[in-house]
């Protein structure tokens, strides 16, 4: 069976049920990870002895259940990118950059200046 990542109607019922049943766990786990990440930025020693996430064991067990379900399916995703010749050259010379509001503004302004937009 194919799962279209953008169409939750194509997701397996048991997968959706597990996600629904464990929503609070997912949120708690990721909130704790975010909290600990912040601590690690402030205290470098915590990067070596990272505090344990009390939700980790249960989270990983649920993730394993989801993984088992997904092993019998194909996941279909789509990605589109249209780059200008100038953007391609920039990537080749400088590498990919994280998409930020400033980069979006620069790309739009460059496209306007080149008459592409």
Image (cartoon, rainbow, N blue to C red):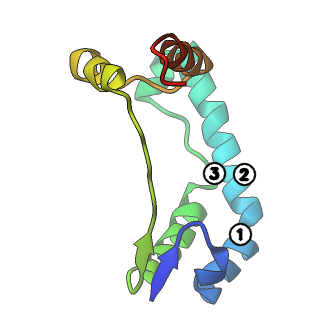
Q: Residue at x 45, y 14 (%)?
A: 114
Q: Residues within 10 Å of mark 2 (few under 14, many from 20)?
A: some
Closest to the observer: 105 or 36? 105
Q: Position of residue 103 (x, y in %)?
A: 52, 18
**C-alpha span from label 1 to label 2:** 10 Å
In the image, is 9 to the left or to the right of 108?
right
Checking the image for residue 28, the label placed there is 2
Mark found first going from the N terminus, 1 or 2: 1
Q: Residue at x 51, y 27 (%)?
A: 99
The N terminus, quarter of image = bottom left
Q: Is residue 47 above or below residue 15?
A: above
Residue 29 lies, in percent from the top left, at: 65, 51
Q: Report the residue at 45% width, 64% height from top.
A: 77
Q: Which mark is residue 22?
A: 1
Q: Please name which of the two marks, 3 or 2, marks the residue nearer to the observer.
A: 2
Residue 15 lies, with reference to residue 41, above or below; the image says: below
- Badge 1, how many Cα within 10 Å: few under 14, some, many 20+? some
Residue lying farthest left? Answer: 92
Q: Quadrant of the C terminus?
A: top right
Where does the image place residue 62, in percent across and percent down from the top left?
Answer: 57, 71
Looking at the rendered structure, the secondary structure element under dot 3 is: loop
Residue 14 drawn above or below residue 90: below
The residue identified by callout 3 is: 54
């Amino acid at each position: 069976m194919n799962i279209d990542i953008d169409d939750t109607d194509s997701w397996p019922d048991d997968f959706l049920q597990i996600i629904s049943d464990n929503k609070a766990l997912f949120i708690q786990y990721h909130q704790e990870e975010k909290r600990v990440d912040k601590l690690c930025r402030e205290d470098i020693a915590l990067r070596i002895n990272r505090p344990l996430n009390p939700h980790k064991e249960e989270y990983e067990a649920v993730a394993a259940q989801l993984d088992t379900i997904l092993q019998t399916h194909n996941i279909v995703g789509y990605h589109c990118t249209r780059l200008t010749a100038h953007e391609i050259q920039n990537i080749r010379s400088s590498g990919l950059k994280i998409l930020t509001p400033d980069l979006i503004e620069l790309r739009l302004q460059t496209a306007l200046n080149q008459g592409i937009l």
